[in-house]
Image: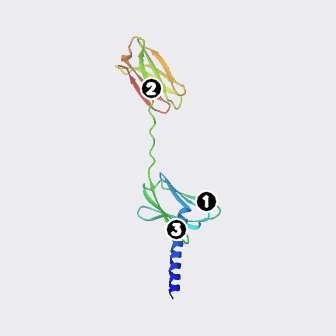
Protein backbone atom coordinates (compact mmCIF):
# COMPACT_ATOMS: atom_id res chain seq x y z
CA UNK A 1 0.00 0.00 0.00
CA UNK A 2 2.85 2.35 0.86
CA UNK A 3 4.41 1.67 -2.56
CA UNK A 4 1.14 2.43 -4.32
CA UNK A 5 0.80 5.72 -2.42
CA UNK A 6 4.41 6.71 -3.27
CA UNK A 7 3.77 5.88 -6.93
CA UNK A 8 0.61 8.04 -6.92
CA UNK A 9 2.48 11.03 -5.45
CA UNK A 10 5.33 10.61 -7.95
CA UNK A 11 2.81 10.47 -10.83
CA UNK A 12 1.04 13.61 -9.59
CA UNK A 13 4.32 15.50 -9.34
CA UNK A 14 5.34 14.35 -12.82
CA UNK A 15 2.00 15.46 -14.32
CA UNK A 16 2.16 18.87 -12.63
CA UNK A 17 5.74 19.23 -13.84
CA UNK A 18 4.61 18.37 -17.38
CA UNK A 19 1.80 20.93 -17.17
CA UNK A 20 4.25 23.60 -16.01
CA UNK A 21 6.63 22.66 -18.82
CA UNK A 22 3.79 22.80 -21.35
CA UNK A 23 3.11 26.42 -20.40
CA UNK A 24 6.83 27.11 -20.63
CA UNK A 25 6.84 25.46 -24.08
CA UNK A 26 4.12 27.78 -25.40
CA UNK A 27 5.93 30.77 -23.84
CA UNK A 28 9.18 29.76 -25.56
CA UNK A 29 7.36 29.17 -28.87
CA UNK A 30 5.57 32.51 -28.92
CA UNK A 31 6.52 36.16 -28.74
CA UNK A 32 4.57 39.43 -28.64
CA UNK A 33 6.04 42.83 -29.50
CA UNK A 34 4.45 46.28 -29.57
CA UNK A 35 5.71 49.15 -31.70
CA UNK A 36 3.70 52.31 -31.00
CA UNK A 37 0.12 51.19 -31.77
CA UNK A 38 1.01 48.04 -33.69
CA UNK A 39 1.24 44.66 -31.99
CA UNK A 40 2.80 41.59 -33.63
CA UNK A 41 2.20 38.08 -32.28
CA UNK A 42 4.77 35.47 -33.38
CA UNK A 43 3.88 31.80 -33.11
CA UNK A 44 6.77 29.46 -33.88
CA UNK A 45 6.56 26.35 -35.98
CA UNK A 46 5.01 23.44 -34.14
CA UNK A 47 2.58 25.34 -31.89
CA UNK A 48 -0.27 23.63 -33.74
CA UNK A 49 -3.82 24.89 -33.41
CA UNK A 50 -4.17 27.97 -31.24
CA UNK A 51 -6.59 30.76 -30.43
CA UNK A 52 -5.09 34.23 -30.25
CA UNK A 53 -7.10 36.98 -28.60
CA UNK A 54 -6.40 40.59 -27.77
CA UNK A 55 -8.08 42.13 -24.74
CA UNK A 56 -8.48 45.78 -23.78
CA UNK A 57 -7.27 47.21 -20.43
CA UNK A 58 -10.63 46.21 -18.86
CA UNK A 59 -10.30 42.58 -20.00
CA UNK A 60 -12.89 42.87 -22.79
CA UNK A 61 -12.07 40.69 -25.80
CA UNK A 62 -11.48 42.93 -28.83
CA UNK A 63 -10.57 40.24 -31.35
CA UNK A 64 -10.02 36.50 -31.44
CA UNK A 65 -8.62 34.37 -34.20
CA UNK A 66 -7.92 30.67 -34.70
CA UNK A 67 -4.64 29.72 -36.37
CA UNK A 68 -2.94 26.46 -37.28
CA UNK A 69 0.82 26.79 -36.99
CA UNK A 70 2.57 23.93 -38.76
CA UNK A 71 5.50 23.97 -41.14
CA UNK A 72 6.59 27.58 -40.55
CA UNK A 73 6.38 30.48 -38.11
CA UNK A 74 3.27 32.69 -38.26
CA UNK A 75 3.10 36.42 -37.48
CA UNK A 76 -0.31 37.86 -36.62
CA UNK A 77 -0.36 41.68 -36.83
CA UNK A 78 -2.79 43.87 -34.89
CA UNK A 79 -3.16 47.58 -35.70
CA UNK A 80 -4.61 49.42 -32.69
CA UNK A 81 -4.41 52.91 -34.21
CA UNK A 82 -8.12 53.59 -33.61
CA UNK A 83 -7.93 52.55 -29.94
CA UNK A 84 -6.65 54.60 -27.01
CA UNK A 85 -3.10 54.11 -25.80
CA UNK A 86 -2.77 51.77 -22.86
CA UNK A 87 -1.95 48.29 -21.68
CA UNK A 88 -3.47 45.43 -23.67
CA UNK A 89 -3.33 41.69 -23.09
CA UNK A 90 -2.57 39.11 -25.75
CA UNK A 91 -3.89 35.66 -24.83
CA UNK A 92 -2.70 32.53 -26.66
CA UNK A 93 -4.51 29.27 -25.97
CA UNK A 94 -3.76 25.79 -27.33
CA UNK A 95 -5.42 22.51 -26.40
CA UNK A 96 -2.96 22.05 -23.50
CA UNK A 97 -1.64 25.50 -22.66
CA UNK A 98 -2.49 29.14 -22.07
CA UNK A 99 -0.11 32.12 -22.07
CA UNK A 100 -0.83 35.82 -21.62
CA UNK A 101 1.39 38.73 -22.59
CA UNK A 102 0.95 42.34 -21.52
CA UNK A 103 1.83 45.03 -24.08
CA UNK A 104 1.76 48.81 -23.82
CA UNK A 105 0.79 50.95 -26.82
CA UNK A 106 1.69 54.62 -27.20
CA UNK A 107 1.52 57.41 -29.76
CA UNK A 108 4.39 57.94 -32.14
CA UNK A 109 5.88 61.36 -31.53
CA UNK A 110 7.14 63.23 -34.52
CA UNK A 111 10.77 64.20 -34.38
CA UNK A 112 10.99 67.95 -34.80
CA UNK A 113 12.88 69.05 -37.88
CA UNK A 114 16.31 70.42 -37.20
CA UNK A 115 16.45 74.20 -37.48
CA UNK A 116 17.83 75.99 -40.50
CA UNK A 117 21.51 76.67 -39.79
CA UNK A 118 22.65 80.04 -41.13
CA UNK A 119 25.11 82.75 -40.10
CA UNK A 120 25.70 86.29 -41.31
CA UNK A 121 28.40 88.79 -40.44
CA UNK A 122 29.44 92.26 -41.53
CA UNK A 123 32.60 92.34 -43.62
CA UNK A 124 34.79 95.07 -45.13
CA UNK A 125 32.66 98.14 -44.74
CA UNK A 126 29.22 97.95 -46.27
CA UNK A 127 29.03 94.25 -47.08
CA UNK A 128 27.67 91.14 -45.38
CA UNK A 129 28.68 87.52 -45.66
CA UNK A 130 25.88 84.94 -45.53
CA UNK A 131 26.59 81.25 -44.82
CA UNK A 132 23.93 78.52 -44.92
CA UNK A 133 24.85 74.90 -44.08
CA UNK A 134 23.19 71.52 -43.61
CA UNK A 135 20.55 71.77 -46.31
CA UNK A 136 18.67 68.52 -46.91
CA UNK A 137 17.29 69.77 -50.23
CA UNK A 138 18.62 72.53 -52.51
CA UNK A 139 16.68 75.77 -52.57
CA UNK A 140 16.82 78.76 -50.23
CA UNK A 141 14.90 81.99 -50.65
CA UNK A 142 17.05 84.89 -49.44
CA UNK A 143 15.38 88.25 -48.72
CA UNK A 144 17.27 91.35 -47.57
CA UNK A 145 14.98 93.93 -45.93
CA UNK A 146 15.41 97.45 -44.61
CA UNK A 147 15.32 97.25 -40.80
CA UNK A 148 13.30 100.43 -40.31
CA UNK A 149 10.50 99.86 -42.85
CA UNK A 150 10.64 96.13 -43.57
CA UNK A 151 10.67 96.93 -47.29
CA UNK A 152 12.39 94.39 -49.56
CA UNK A 153 15.84 95.44 -50.72
CA UNK A 154 16.71 92.18 -52.55
CA UNK A 155 15.09 88.78 -53.03
CA UNK A 156 16.74 85.79 -54.70
CA UNK A 157 16.59 82.00 -54.77
CA UNK A 158 19.80 80.01 -54.39
CA UNK A 159 19.79 76.35 -55.46
CA UNK A 160 22.95 74.83 -54.01
CA UNK A 161 22.99 71.34 -52.49
CA UNK A 162 24.11 71.04 -48.85
CA UNK A 163 24.76 74.78 -48.38
CA UNK A 164 26.37 77.95 -49.70
CA UNK A 165 28.29 81.08 -48.80
CA UNK A 166 27.69 84.44 -50.48
CA UNK A 167 28.70 88.08 -50.00
CA UNK A 168 26.21 90.96 -50.45
CA UNK A 169 27.47 94.51 -51.04
CA UNK A 170 25.22 97.16 -49.46
CA UNK A 171 24.91 100.51 -51.21
CA UNK A 172 23.94 103.56 -49.17
CA UNK A 173 23.20 101.60 -45.98
CA UNK A 174 25.20 99.76 -43.35
CA UNK A 175 24.68 96.21 -42.08
CA UNK A 176 22.82 97.51 -38.99
CA UNK A 177 20.19 99.02 -41.31
CA UNK A 178 19.18 95.64 -42.85
CA UNK A 179 18.18 92.14 -41.84
CA UNK A 180 18.10 88.85 -43.75
CA UNK A 181 15.15 86.44 -43.98
CA UNK A 182 15.81 82.88 -45.13
CA UNK A 183 13.38 80.11 -46.06
CA UNK A 184 14.53 76.71 -47.34
CA UNK A 185 12.78 74.10 -49.52
CA UNK A 186 11.50 72.25 -46.41
CA UNK A 187 9.79 75.40 -45.09
CA UNK A 188 12.29 76.08 -42.31
CA UNK A 189 13.01 79.77 -41.81
CA UNK A 190 15.45 82.01 -40.01
CA UNK A 191 15.91 85.76 -39.61
CA UNK A 192 19.37 87.26 -39.10
CA UNK A 193 20.00 90.75 -37.64
CA UNK A 194 23.19 92.81 -37.41
CA UNK A 195 24.25 94.94 -34.45
Circle 3 or circle 1, nearest the eye: 3
> Of residues 117 and 151, which is closer to you in this image?
117
Q: Position of residue 14 (x, y in %)?
A: 53, 75
Q: Position of residue 26 (x, y in %)?
A: 54, 65
- In the displayed structure, 161 sits above or below 2; it is above
**Residue ID for mark 3:** 23
**Residue ID for mark 1:** 73
Q: Determine the CA span between mark 3 and mark 1.
A: 18 Å
Q: Determine the CA span between mark 2 and mark 1.
A: 52 Å
Circle 2 or circle 1, nearest the eye: 1
**Residue ID for mark 2:** 118
- In the displayed structure, 116 sits above or below 150; it is below
For the residue carrying disc 1, how many other residues have a C-alpha within 10 Å: few (<14), some (14-19), or many (20+)?
some
Numbered circle sitting on residue 58:
none
Q: Quadrant of the C terminus?
A: top left
Element assignment for label 2: strand
> Of residues 86 and 24, which is closer to you in this image?
24
Element assignment for label 3: helix
Q: Residue at x 54, y 62 (%)?
A: 28
Q: Determine the CA span between mark 3 and mark 2.
A: 61 Å
Q: Position of residue 131 (x, y in %)?
A: 47, 22
Q: Residue at x 45, y 21 (%)?
A: 130
Element assignment for label 1: loop
For the residue carrying disc 2, how many other residues have a C-alpha within 10 Å: few (<14), some (14-19), or many (20+)?
some
The tag earlier along the polypeptide, 3 or 1, is 3
Question: Is mark 3 in CB contact (under 8 Å) with mark 2?
Answer: no
The tag earlier along the polypeptide, 2 or 1, is 1
Amino acid sequence: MKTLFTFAIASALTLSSLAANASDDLKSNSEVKANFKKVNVLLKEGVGQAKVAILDPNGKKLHQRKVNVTGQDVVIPYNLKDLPCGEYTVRIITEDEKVEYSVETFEKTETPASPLVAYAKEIEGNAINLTVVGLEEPGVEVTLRYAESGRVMLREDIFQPAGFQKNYRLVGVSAEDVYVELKDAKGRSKTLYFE
